[in-house]
Amino acid sequence: MPEIRLQSVTKIFGRKVEAVKDLSFIIEDGEYVSLIGPSGCGKTTTLRLLAGTILPTQGNIYFDNKSVENLSIRDRNIGFVFQHFAIFPHLTVWENAAYGPRVRGRKNSEIDSLVDHALKAVQIDDKAELYPPSLSAPDWQKTALARVIASEAKILLLDEPLGALDQKIREEFQVFLRNLVKKEGLTAIHVTHDQSEALTISDKVAVMNKGKLVQLGTASDLIFTPNNIFTSFFVGESDFLESVVLNDKEDFAEVRVGQSTIKVKNMGISRGRRAVVAVRREFFKVHKYEDKIKTGNFLPGVVVRDQFLGLLRRVRVKLENQQIVEVKIHAKHPIRFKENEKVRLVIDPSSTRCFEYPEEGVASALEM
Ligand code: ADP
Ligand code: MG
């Protein structure tokens, strides 16, 4: 279970497809890290660089402080599990798991004990003699995992491993997978497009965009203290209020949004600077305009639409500056809002983030 370090790794395909750009991060020994980001942002390329199936154009990768530049794929001690099951259909579950140690020339007695351990660890020992075509989708993935464990890999790379499973099974499998990785003492890197999966399963999540690392942090870091606009947008959903900082003296800064002044988290942006305040859509509260509310920290607006989305409702509100923001409220919220009704959007300063206005504009900063 080594520590993995990427140092300024760039991968360019052909002449100019920069799939990964100047990527640096550390995955600690025994950590479970997920990579998330829009399609094409470089997640699979990052896994392939770690595996050694492709080499960096620039930069270095270290396992336990040793450069892996000259380590072959086999000597990297890595196991893979993909969405599309990489196991042999004509071999039994047992024979599939035995494949790794057999190729490495282990003795029969060692193979027996490695395979027995692996099949028990993934709870498929009762199906050892079955062939994959008679197995369910989760058991195919368990067989692939048994193969990794029997091969004594210390790093597990997973690329959308649960992509072919139904939602309910997928959620159970997430817990199973995390427990397995921890029990076997592996370092795991898991690519998924499903951010709730990433936030559930991992110690840390790396958000990537356009080949770059945007933020690496715990689920709580990414949800409650994103350190940039892209993470605020991509992990959960936020609205962005364009504003100007009026004072920056206290824990909470005052900013002007249109004609209104609100308090937001002070994140060190100086007075007079343009800023973007990010508010997660679940963190706004919406009240009828005439309701008595205890706080002065609100933005007035007019309802555009109040729409059911399963368990939630989405209320679109046009602010005085003409910006339309969305608020997520529970479907059973006692008030139904009418079109053109005046409302107040109450903002809890401690649940805001306040970023420097991006030079390239908000839309470009969010481009994927
Ligand atoms: P993700 O897994 O995040 O969807 P990938 O790492 O597969 O993204 O791809 C990142 C970028 O690199 C994409 O623009 C993709 O088209 C490009 N790319 C990936 N593999 C190759 C390749 N072998 N040759 C050329 N371009 C590639
Ligand atoms: Mg991919």
Image (spheres, helix red, strand yellow):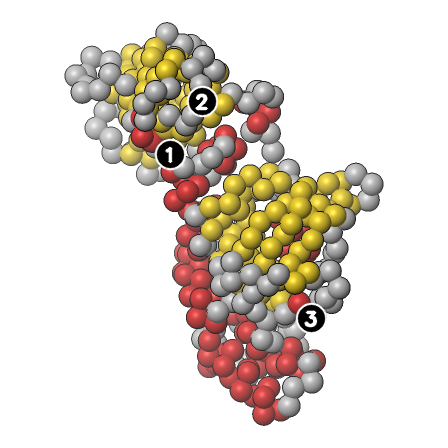
On the image, the x and y values in percent for residue 189 come to: 55, 57
Residue mark closest to the camera, 2 vs 3: 2
> Could you tell me the amino acid type at mark 3?
Asp
In the rendering, which numbered label is found on residue 269?
2
Callout 1 environment at 10 Å: few (<14), some (14 to 19), or many (20+)?
Answer: few
N-terminal of the pair, mark 2 or mark 1, is: 2
Looking at the image, which residue is at 63% across and 52% down?
6
> Against 316, is 257 above or below?
above
In the rendering, which numbered label is found on residue 309?
1
Quadrant containing the N terminus is bottom right
In terms of secondary structure, where does tag 1 sit?
strand
Callout 2 environment at 10 Å: few (<14), some (14 to 19), or many (20+)?
Answer: some
On the image, the x and y values in percent for residue 145 come to: 54, 69
Q: Is residue 132 visible?
A: no
Q: Residue furthest right?
A: 15
Q: What separation in Å lies between label 2 and label 1 (alpha carbons)? A: 36 Å
Q: Is mark 3 within 8 Å of ligand 1?
A: no
Q: Is residue 350 left or right of residue 146?
A: left
Residue mark closest to the camera, 1 vs 3: 3
Callout 3 environment at 10 Å: few (<14), some (14 to 19), or many (20+)?
Answer: few
In terms of secondary structure, where does tag 2 sit?
loop
On the image, the x and y values in percent for residue 187 come to: 53, 63
Q: What separation in Å lies between label 2 and label 3 (alpha carbons)? A: 49 Å
Specify the quadrant of the image occupied by residue 88.
bottom right
> Could you tell me the amino acid type at mark 1?
Leu
Count of picture labels: 3
